[in-house]
Image: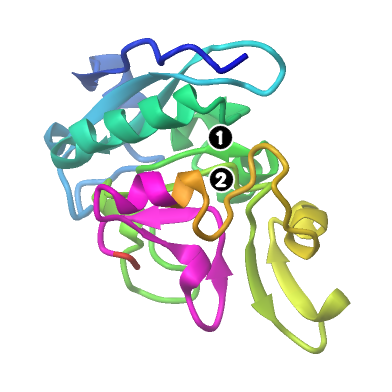
């Protein structure tokens, strides 16, 4: 039986308690966007275990409507998203969030090893099911010739299939994001970030 149409997701301003939880953890005053530019999307999603909880995704307000449409499409096709909680839920620890297969958007941080703001710092990027769709880069010195993050995602990096929750080239997830003009990190040339989508394509 085909999944039902998605219950309506919503966008709302950050509550005072959410602002407090973010400040000093995933947002500081030097971040590229002020807290007033961010909204919380409350999104029903299939968790892969038979439930349909409502997750929270913090994004820039100017992409909110587009993302509500994307996640309605993902719900309608039954795409599983086991966890969807803001980055501060994990204390701003990316490794912990990825290990929990947590889908996350806003996180005001620099690209690892650089002084360049991540696309996540703009609120216009998200990582979807990162354990099942890890970051991968060829490295002859690494096991299986690949560096993988999170490392626990290695099995999924080596065997890409049409298993539920995986993001595949030309599949419905990539198509849903492409329809709003977002690029997918799975097309990058050196390292492929299979979990990553952004408005800039970076």
Of the pair 131 and 66, the residue shown nearer to us: 66
Residue 142 to residue 128: above or below = below
Q: Where's the N terminus, which quadrant?
A: top right
Q: Over which residues does the magenta segment extend?
A: 175-200
Within-10-Å neighbours for mark 2: few <14, some 14–19, many 20+: some
Q: What residue lies at 56% left-to-right and 45% top-to-bottom? A: 93
Q: Position of residue 99 (x, y in %)?
A: 69, 43
Q: How is the image coloured?
A: rainbow
Residue on which the image places disc 2:
93
Q: Does the segment drawn in magenta span residue 192?
A: yes
* Quadrant in the rendering for residue 114: bottom left
As drawn, is 171 to the left or to the right of 19?
A: right
Of all residues shown, which one is farthest toward the front?
Answer: 1
Q: Does residue 192 show up?
A: yes
Q: What residue lies at 73% left-to-right and 85% top-to-bottom? A: 139
Q: Where's the C terminus, which quadrant?
A: bottom left
Q: Which mark is residue 90?
A: 1
Q: Position of residue 66 (x, y in %)?
A: 23, 37
Q: Position of residue 167 (x, y in %)?
A: 58, 50
Q: What residue lies at 60% left-to-right and 48% top-to-bottom? A: 130
Q: Position of residue 37 (x, y in %)?
A: 13, 37
**Circles 2 and 1: CB distance less than 8 Å?**
yes
Q: Does residue 107 show up?
A: no
Of the pair 111 and 178, the residue shown nearer to us: 178
* Quadrant in the rendering for residue 79: top right
Count of numbered marks:
2
Of all residues shown, which one is farthest toward the bottom?
Answer: 140
Residue 93 to residue 38: above or below = below
Quick one: SS at disc 2?
loop
Residue 105 to residue 79: above or below = below
């Amino acid at each position: 039986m085909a999944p039902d149409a998605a219950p309506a997701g919503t966008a709302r301003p950050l509550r005072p308690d959410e602002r407090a939880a973010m400040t000093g953890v995933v947002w500081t005053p030097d971040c590229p966007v002020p807290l007033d530019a961010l909204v919380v999307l409350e999104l029903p999603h299939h968790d892969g275990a038979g439930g349909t909880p409502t997750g929270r995704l913090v994004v820039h307000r100017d992409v909110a409507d587009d993302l509500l449409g994307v996640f309605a499409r993902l719900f309608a096709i039954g795409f599983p998203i086991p966890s969807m909680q803001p980055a501060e839920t994990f204390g701003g620890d990316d490794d912990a969030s990825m290990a929990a297969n947590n889908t996350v958007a806003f996180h005001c941080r620099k690209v690892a090893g650089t002084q360049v703001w991540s696309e996540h710092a703009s609120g216009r990027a998200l990582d979807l099911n990162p354990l099942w769709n890890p970051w991968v880069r060829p490295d002859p010195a690494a096991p299986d010739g690949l560096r993988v993050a999170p490392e626990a995602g290695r099995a999924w990096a080596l065997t890409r299939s049409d298993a539920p929750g995986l993001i595949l080239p030309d599949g419905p997830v990539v198509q849903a994001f492409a329809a709003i003009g977002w690029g997918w990190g799975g097309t990058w040339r050196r390292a492929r970030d299979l979990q990553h989508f952004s408005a800039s394509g970076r």
